[in-house]
Amino acid sequence: MRVLITGAAGFLGSHLCDRLLKEGHQVVGLDNFITGKRENLAHLATNEDFKFIRHDVSNYIFVPGELDAVLHFASPASPNPNSAVGYPNLPIQTMKAGALGTHNTLGVALAHNARYLLASTSEIYGDPLEHPQTESYWGNVDPIGERSVYDEAKRFAESLTMAYHRFHDVNTAIVRIFNTYGPRIHFDDGRVVPNFITQAIRGEPLTVYGDGEQTRSFCYVDDLIEGIYRLLMSEEHFPVNIGNPAETTMNEFAAVVNKLVGNQAGVKHQEWERKPGDPQRRQPDITRARELLGFEPKVSLEDGLRHTVEFLKTQIELA
């Protein structure tokens, strides 16, 4: 196939480029580098099957030649207001990527009669009242809260994707991505995985907010990409959760990170007033992914973190 990937220089987009090229496909990568990094694609510079276009997805998209698939992964994703790549600092760009970017990429898929895959998110469930979260859950989202620029952009993107499927018969798919980590993640992303690892590498106590009993479910990037690839190659049109259902408290996660890095500084608990919309628990129900795609995460938390630690060590040294 010849495949267009938006957000190609991002954490997930660049891994998708690698996987599709490895499978023998041709890839056209598109990115404007607002949050993507050139170095994520530097190793593909001499690959004849890879072409890069610098472009903003919120503007009209033209790709010469045939396309068999379009994967829309362009969007800021970090909720951290202290991070330069966080969507609180890029609110308009985030909503445009989810709204205009989805509209433009669906137009490309329609014009080329291509398979279309939208990168959605577990954040469409908001602060869930259902646990674990199934695809049939409609969510608990504040439409005007601080997180709404991302949450509602993705919810709109899903609605528009299904409209194109139902009205224009576009061959669409939607992946709802849960917390993912691994090499190429921003060390200053602001989320818990790079935060904890960075503090541990520097020999600092890990900052655990509140009592540390809030949970996340961490999926290693190779497992996520495997699930996405299987979904792309399937005939499924409705949303599918992809993630790792192993639920971990922040206290447990901090202990694993300190053990792997050999950090003796332990943790420090900091008072924390949970912001509206910030989920207390996050865990995917991946029953549909198992049944439809034969998907099962294989990389253990410790093994995935080892690879991530080695990557972030180099990033911290370069910073």
Image (cartoon, rainbow, N blue to C red):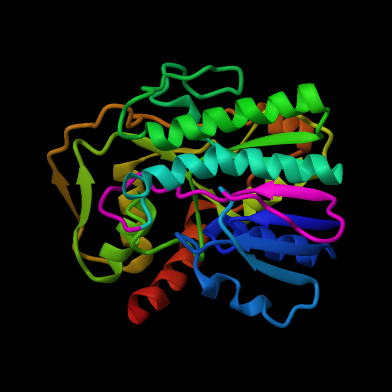
Q: Please state the horizontal and vertical placement of residue 86, each as a whole percent of the image.
A: 36, 51
In percent of the image, x 84 and y 34: which residue is there? 235
Q: Is residue 240 above or below residue 116?
A: above
Q: Is residue 175 left or right of residue 253?
A: right
Quarter holding residue 6 = bottom right
In percent of the image, x 20 and y 36: which residue is there? 211
- Magenta span of residues: 59-84
For the N terminus, give its image quadrant. Answer: bottom right
Q: Is residue 312 magenta?
A: no
Q: Please state the horizontal and vertical placement of residue 35, each as a whole percent of the image.
A: 45, 59
Q: How many marks?
A: 0
Q: Please state the horizontal and vertical placement of residue 117, each as a whole percent of the image.
A: 71, 41
Q: Is residue 12 above or below residue 239?
A: below
Q: Please state the horizontal and vertical placement of residue 296, each as a whole percent of the image.
A: 68, 42
In percent of the image, x 71 and y 39: which residue is there? 106
Q: Is residue 78 left or right of residue 175?
A: left
Residue furthest front as drawn: 60
Quarter holding residue 240 = top right
The one nearer the camera, 50 or 122, is: 50
Q: Main secondary structure of the magenta part?
A: loop
Q: Is residue 308 above or below residue 114?
A: below
The one nearer the camera, 130 or 259, is: 130
Residue 56 visible in the displayed image = yes
Q: Is residue 24 left or right of residue 185?
A: right
